[in-house]
Image (spheres, rainbow, N blue to C red):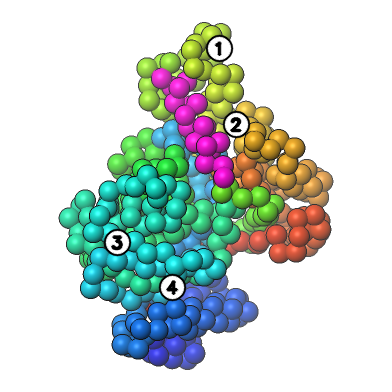
């Protein structure tokens, strides 16, 4: 479809139904999103004027960020997670090319250009956007797809480095584009998520699990069991926060994950060392009673630290807690669910130890935000570290009557606009046009 035709559809409200599915039906939200898409279409023409002059057919894609509801650092041990796609997303305005070059202009960043005729990992590209693009394209190529180039303008309101998984949303967005353009949609949501994880692990160099990509790609509120990563078990659940009387609020403490890959990667490394002591590769394969019966031996085992043992103890309780949280939601037992969320937060703080960076131990924005949250919430609601941790965001389930007080209290410390009231998005990555 031509840019002018898409603009006409937006202005004549023909896409309001699609936008409502992604962002909700509030008139102010719809107006904001329509303006956002119009700006993105206009920016595409400015960034790629030589392309726009040819009046090409354009496609439009969206991939959401995600909120981890339960299962902090369980996915990389083939454990369980409870996660939700949210109404913050990346959108891409895309035009195809006839060569093997992918050019992406992300709003606020330099142009990224990758020649995907070579799909081998490059050491020089570690921890770069180029690595993610090349890595995702490589997985489709390995499956027999003839991946061609494209030009894309991307804009995002998924907070970068904040625990809402902007990198996973980007990987899934690239995967969705390639699957649509060059693969006939055959890969689907689960495989696209796997491709994104491989790109992040092997090409980018970050030892992430599969939760972020899966939640973004599949959408809605899902419980995922990664024991069989080739065919993860995915179960949908319902949580109507409005009916429950709560709002999901993510607070950005303004700390970035950007330079914390080594600390993040240390967690799965330490957990696998403990699993290895029992002759297993992942903690999900060991028995909890056996773990506790061997604590004294573990402490004296080469290469296993006290911290590794504590982090493993976190996994064992957190992994079981995910199932309890999902069941509480199915039962409509919101008090029990909130109690479990708080328990998850306490375990992350005391056992997993991912509330602040060991490189900068005096900067403790996440503990500060949690302290303020508990002061406002009292015995109501729940709060916990959100995502990978060490920096970034916290998550809180706030009673509707306390939302204004909560936001004003947190934003007084972390700045205006640091609190984001999120909705669960019912769908994952999509092609709108």
Whether residue 106 is visible, yes or no, is yes
| Element carrying mark 4 | strand
Identify the mark nearer the N-term, 2 or 4: 4
User: Which is in the foreground here, disc 4 or disc 3?
Assistant: 3
- Residue 31 locus on image (x, y percent): 58, 82
Dots 4 and 3: beta carbons under 8 Å? no
Question: Main structural element of the magenta stretch: helix, strand or loop?
Answer: helix
Which residue occupies 43% across, 83% down?
45
Question: Which circle marks residue 115 in the picture?
Answer: 3
User: Which is in the foreground here, disc 3 or disc 2?
Assistant: 3
How many C-alpha atoms fall within 10 Å of the one at disc 4: few (<14), some, or many (≥20)?
many
Q: Hey, which quadrant is residue 27 in on the image?
A: bottom right
The outermost residue toward the left is 144
How many C-alpha atoms fall within 10 Å of the one at disc 2: few (<14), some, or many (≥20)?
many
- Residue 318 locus on image (x, y percent): 55, 33
- Left or right placement of residue 206 versus residue 364 in this view: left
- Residue ID for mark 4: 153
- Left or right placement of residue 332 versus residue 91 in this view: right
- Cα–Cα gap, marks 2 and 4: 38 Å
- Residue 136 locus on image (x, y percent): 33, 54
- Residue 272 locus on image (x, y percent): 44, 26
In this view of the protein, which residue sits in the foreground, 158 or 382? Answer: 158
Identify the mark nearer the N-term, 4 or 1: 4
């Amino acid at each position: 479809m031509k840019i002018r035709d898409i603009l006409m559809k937006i202005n004549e409200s023909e896409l309001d139904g699609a936008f409502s599915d992604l962002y909700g039906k509030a008139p102010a939200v719809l107006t904001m999103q329509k303006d956002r898409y119009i700006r993105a279409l206009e920016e595409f023409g400015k960034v790629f004027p030589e392309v726009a002059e040819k009046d090409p057919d354009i496609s439009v894609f969206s991939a959401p960020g995600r909120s981890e509801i339960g299962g902090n650092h369980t996915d990389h041990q083939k454990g369980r997670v409870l996660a939700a796609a949210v109404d913050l997303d990346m959108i891409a305005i895309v035009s195809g090319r006839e060569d093997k070059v992918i050019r992406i202009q992300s709003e606020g960043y330099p142009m990224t250009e990758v020649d995907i005729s070579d799909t081998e990992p490059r050491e020089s590209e570690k921890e770069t956007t180029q690595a993610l693009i090349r890595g995702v394209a490589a997985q489709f190529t390995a499956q027999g797809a003839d991946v061609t180039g494209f030009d894309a303008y991307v804009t995002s309101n998924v907070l970068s480095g904040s625990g809402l998984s902007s990198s996973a949303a980007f990987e899934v967005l690239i995967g969705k584009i390639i699957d649509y353009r060059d693969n006939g949609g055959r890969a689907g949501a689960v495989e696209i998520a796997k491709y994104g994880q491989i790109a992040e692990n092997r090409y980018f160099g970050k030892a992430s699990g599969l939760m972020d990509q899966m939640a973004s790609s599949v959408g809605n509120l899902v419980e995922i069991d990664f024991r069989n990563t080739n065919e993860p078990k995915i179960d949908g659940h319902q949580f109507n926060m409005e009916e429950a009387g709560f709002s999901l609020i993510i607070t950005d403490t303004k700390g970035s994950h950007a330079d914390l890959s080594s600390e993040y990667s240390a967690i799965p490394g330490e957990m696998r060392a403990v699993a290895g002591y029992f002759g297993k590769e992942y903690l999900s394969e060991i028995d909890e009673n056996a773990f506790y019966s061997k604590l004294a031996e573990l402490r004296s085992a080469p290469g296993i630290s006290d911290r590794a043992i504590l982090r493993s103890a976190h996994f064992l309780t957190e992994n079981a807690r995910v199932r309890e949280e999902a069941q509480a939601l199915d039962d409509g037992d919101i008090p029990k669910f909130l109690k479990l969320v708080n328990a998850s937060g306490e375990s992350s703080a005391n056992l997993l130890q991912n509330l602040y960076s060991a490189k900068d131990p005096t900067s403790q924005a996440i503990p500060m935000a949690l302290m303020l949250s508990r002061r406002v919430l009292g015995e109501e609601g729940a709060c916990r570290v959100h995502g990978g941790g060490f920096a970034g965001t916290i998550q809180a389930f706030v009673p509707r009557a306390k939302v204004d007080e909560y936001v004003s209290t947190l934003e007084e410390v972390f700045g205006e606009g640091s609190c984001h009231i999120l909705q669960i998005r019912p769908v994952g990555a999509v092609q709108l046009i």
